[in-house]
Amino acid sequence: MTNLLSLTCWLNSAPEGVIAYAADSSVSKSDLENRVAFWMRILPAEKGQRWAVYHKDSAEFLSIVFALWQLDCIACIPGDNRPATCERLRQRVQGFIGDFPADLVSYDISGVVVSFDVAPEWRVLNTDSPALEIYTSGTTGEPKAIGKTFAQLESEVAALEALWPGNRDAVVISTATHQHFYGLIFRLIWPMVRGQCFEIQQWQYTEDVYSRAQRYSAFSLVSTPSHLGRINTTVAWAEVAERCCSVLSSAAPLQRKDSLSVAKLLKTQVREIYGSSETGAIAWRIQSDRNEEAWQALPGIRLSQTDDSLLTVTANQLLEPGFKMSDRVEFVCDGRFKLLERVDRIVKVEGKRVSLAEVELVVQNNPFIEVVKALVITRKRTEVALVAELTGMGRQELALIGKRKLVQQFRQYLQDFFEPVLLPRRWRFVDQMPYNAQGKLPMDSLQAMFEQEEVKWPELLSQTVEGQVAELVCRIPAELIYFDGHFAGNPILPGIAQVHWAEHYGRQMLNLTGRFDRLQVIKFQQVIFPESTISLSLEFNPETDKLSFRFYSDKGVHSSGRICFS
Amino acid sequence: MSDLQLEIKQMIIETLDLEDIEPAEIIDDEPLFVEGLGLDSIDALEIGLALQKRYGIKLKADSEDTREHFSSVNALAILIESQRAS
């Protein structure tokens, strides 16, 4: 057993003294109790109700949550306070507390002062009562609510404590928000039941972490791959490394090189946690400098896999055994596993979970959009990208104001629904989605639209295949490498590039596999200029093994010929 | 547009891998975050690192102050020039 305080009687049993630190001050347990009493006095809450809580200050946030618990209510914790989130919550909750638009807030704090000399006797909470409701993206595109009882929360932190008892004098500094479940557990609830102090502010820059660390004789860092992967290595970490007791990372797997780099800077191994809002923390790993480390279960958690390799979890913190995750895994040895891909359309972008189906649903509601496909691409960072067909109105708008302004409009519209890092950063407007001969939309063709290599290919506006005939419409980008040096000041598309494209798309779209043998009846009739729109028609004759191609536009035929395969 | 401003805009586009935008289209005093260019918190981290790498700028550990420097191209130019001078 671990010697943790119980959440259900924390207000009575936690020792007096400092529990948290603000920028330049501290918060004592009796300060917190005063705030709990204050919120109990002003909230018009009744037993069994749900209330939404969003507050940047972790101590104030906790006060509100404790007050709701004392009032026998459930604290509903949204990950953000965007208009669409509030609108959705409105159906589920009695009221809103904290940083929400004024018209949603139904209590009055003016003139209320609560203070006491002797702390009141707080109600002991029922361990099996619902404590929290959190939200996460569901596969259908609709966010889903997840309830947590006190017992579930306590069981989750007990597993963590069993693995990593560690130094309780270390102050918890964090770059993660408590509005997300990971932050809530790791920077508030776990420290609180250990009697460990935490900082009430979330820090955005690693320079902030450094300066906060200088204030304490011992500290623990709770962070994410987004921050640890972008740590400023020139800061004098050596000055604070001796005081670093632990570094935690969760929300997404941390790259091995980032894990090792942080471990070196802070002279502390990075403990990575794998889990989900549904299950809480279930597995952990510490990277080794030899190879990619596999994950292993936290104490008390039993893991197995389904026939199709989905990870399943059985644990006290889960109400039902055998919870099925959406991650495929491969068990390697000693019950350790490697994470493979997800099976649904839910993705992690900078540690934030988002359903691509939800992105599509929201974008689709815009009158400029006919059809849209959302995907995740990895370039310099992992980001959401969109391929869309515009409506007539949308095409008019595009012609009128240009791509940049149109994208800006879309992003503005999406801001009400998604956190900034989840907003699509790359957009492709096409005349037709790149369906293949089987009528499917291959992910590869969508991904290919966002590849960042040297520009060697035209931008495809539409592509169709029927039998042995393929038709493509493409824009000729000015950035094509073929324009470099091909007649300075007067760039034209070289003939060899045209032949190369014809061969390439023939192989890709008509599944040609033969060896390029020779060319026949090649004619270059008109030059092709940058930024023009050109159609390419391809027809393969299987009997002669010849591919005929023709580049044409409203100006007529630009070039044509036959490629002979053998 | 001064050379420094242009350089900053090129740095932003390159570092953040932005597309559909030319340096000339970024307005010197337009907000970089949320409105205007619409950058996010990860971009802020990347800009911080790029400033450190290219100009040797150490950000003061004070978020308020940092946010002010990151508000626009002009504000970034002032930050870079002030550190060059000192």
Image (cartoon, coloured by chain):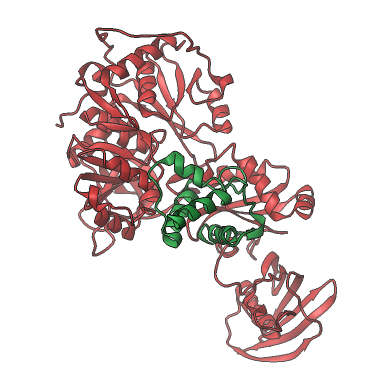
- A362 sits to left or right of A94: right
State the residue at coordinates (25%, 32%).
Answer: A191
- A429 sits to left or right of A352: right
x, y percent for residue A545: 66, 86
Q: Quadrant of residue A298?
A: top left
x, y percent for residue A544: 68, 88
State the residue at coordinates (28%, 58%).
Answer: A260
- A268 sits to left or right of B26: left
Q: Colour of chain B?
A: green
Work out whether residue A311 can be spotted: yes
x, y percent for residue A195: 21, 28
Compared with A130, A168 (above or below) is below
Picture quarter with the N terminus of chain A:
top left
Compared with A243, A337 (above or below) is below
For this rendering, which residue is in front, A349 or A504? A349
State the residue at coordinates (45%, 44%).
Answer: B66
Q: Colour of chain A?
A: red
